[in-house]
Image (cartoon, grey):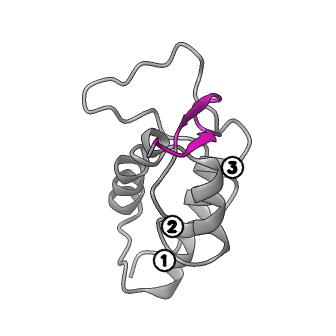
Amino acid sequence: MSARLVQCVKFGKELPGLKKPPFPGALGQRIYENVSQQGWELWPAQSTLLINHYGLNLRDPAAQKFLMQQMEEFYFGAGAQLPEDWVPEGEGAPAPQGKGGVPAPQKK
């Protein structure tokens, strides 16, 4: 069986998609339908950057909501597609995308 292809919003081209939605709900389904496996692999570094920068406690519902908003912005916000000549540096993490005007939860 061949890999399922998606038109990846991050890379702007057709690439193998995820095997299943990364998590339940509308955003998980939207990522499944529009983000390649390669595009999904960019998120862990981006989320780590956000968690560390804002000192997020992932048990805090406000921090979880903020991270989900940032994920949506990372994949579907303005400027979400990587530049055509983008090459991963070091560990393969792209430069952080814009914050999308979403205020960060306050540190506790």
Q: Residues within 10 Å of mark 1 (few under 14, many from 20)?
A: some
Please identify the residue farthest to the left as the structure is shown.
90
Q: Earlier in the sequence, mark 3 or mark 2?
A: 2
Name the secondary structure under disc 1.
Answer: helix
Q: The residue under label 2 is which amino acid type?
A: Leu
Majority secondary structure of the magenta segment? loop
Marks 3 and 1 sit apart, C-alpha to C-alpha, by 18 Å
Residue that lies at the very extreme toward the front in this rendered image: 1
Residue 67 numbered mark, or none: 2
Position of 30 compared to 65: left or right?
right
In which quarter of the view is residue 42 placed? top left
Q: Which residues are magenta?
A: 2-16
The residue located at (37%, 78%) in the rendering is 58
Q: Is residue 103 visible?
A: no
The residue beneath circle 3 is 76
User: Could you tell me residue 79's position as x and y percent?
Assistant: 69, 35
- Given residues 19 and 30, the one toward you in this image is 19
Q: Which mark is residue 52?
A: none
Cα distance, mark 2 to mark 1? 5 Å
Residue 84, located in which quarter of the rendered image?
A: top right
For the residues bearing labels 2 and 1, Cβ distance under 8 angstroms: yes
Q: Amino acid at mark 1?
A: Gln
In reply to whether residue 32 is colored magenta, the answer given is: no
Residue at label 1?
A: 64
State the image coordinates of residue 62 (x, y, percent, origin top left).
Answer: 53, 82
The residue located at (61%, 78%) in the rendering is 25
Q: Between tags 3 and 2, which lies in front? A: 3
The secondary element bearing badge 3 is classed as helix
Question: First in sequence: mark 3 or mark 1?
Answer: 1
The amino acid at mark 3 is Phe
Q: Is residue 5 magenta?
A: yes
